[in-house]
Amino acid sequence: MAHDSHWTSKIPQIVWRGTVWYNQAIRGGLTEAAKGKSWADVSAMDWSTKDNYMTVDEMCRYAMTAHTEGGSYSGRLKFLLNCDSLTVIHDLTWRTYFYHLLEKEGPNQNYVAVRRDFSDLEDKVQYYLEHPDEAEHVVQNSVATFRNRYLAPAAQSCYLRKLIQGYSTVAQTPNIYRPPKEGQTIPMRRGRGFEDWLQGGEDYTEEQDNP
C-alpha cells in the first residue's frame, strides 16, 4: 500500500471523517471525546461541500483509524483494515461475515476495542502512543489476518462463490412454466428470466410469456 510504514513513522493521531447526524449517539460520542485533543484528527464533514473530505488512502498515513457504525452495519471497516494502521472499533451491534475474526485481546489481537460511547478513547490512544511496539504487533496481526488473507480480493470472491453455491442447495427451484390449460400444446412461462429482462429492458407483459 502507498502509505505502508512502521507505526512510529505515521502521523501520531487517530483519524475519522463522517457525518455526525447519522447515528448521533456513536459518532457524536467520538467527536466529543476527540474534541480539541492533540492526538486526534476527527472531524464531521458536509457531503454537499465535501469540507474536510479525506480518502481512505490519506487516512492510512495516520497511526490510528476509527470505525463507527451508521444506521446499521457500516462498510467502512473493510477499507480501514487495508491500512497498516491501528484500527479502533467501538462495541458493535451489527455483524457481517468477517467480524468473527476480530480479536480484541491476547497474542492474536488485531484491533483496539473501546466503549460504544468512546469514553475510554483517550486512555486507549495514549496507551498505544506510549507503547509503540505493542501497537505495531497489533497492526501486523491485522494485516496478516485481513488485508493479506480474508479481505484479499481472491478470498472475497471465493467466499461469495461458496455462499451462492450453498444457498442454491437450500433454495426453492421454481417452475418457470404455468400449469397447462386444456388443449394447450405450447408451454406458457410464468414470468421472464432475469437475464432476458436485462437485455430487453422493458417490463414483462402477458404477450411475452411464450418461449
Image (tube, rainbow, N blue to C red):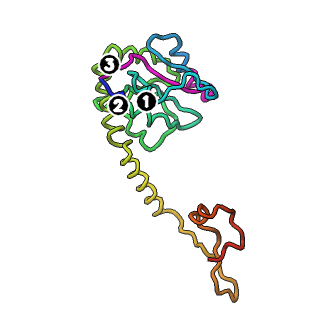
- Name which residue type carries label 2: Asn
Q: Which residues are magenta?
A: 6-28
Q: Quadrant of residue 207?
A: bottom right
Q: Residue at x 46, y 34 (%)?
A: 77
- Image position, residue 109 (x, y; %): 33, 30
Instruction: Let me know if residue 152 is in the magenta part.
Output: no
- Image position, residue 158 (x, y; %): 38, 52
Which callout, 1 or 2, points at the residue further toward the start of the chain?
Answer: 1
- Name which residue type carries label 3: Ser
* Dot label at residue 110: 2
Compute the Cα span from label 3 to label 1.
16 Å
| Residue neighbourhood size for the residue with mark 3, other residues' Cα within 10 Å, grouped as few (<14), some (14–19), many (≥20) | few
Up/down of 116 relative to 203, above or below: above
Q: Quadrant of the C terminus?
A: bottom right
CB within 8 Å, label 1 to label 2: no
Eye-nearest disc, 1 or 2: 1
Q: Quadrant of the N terminus?
A: top left
Residue at mark 1? 57
Asked whether, in this view, residue 178 is left or right of residue 98, the answer is right
Residue at mark 3? 9
- Name which residue type carries label 1: Asp
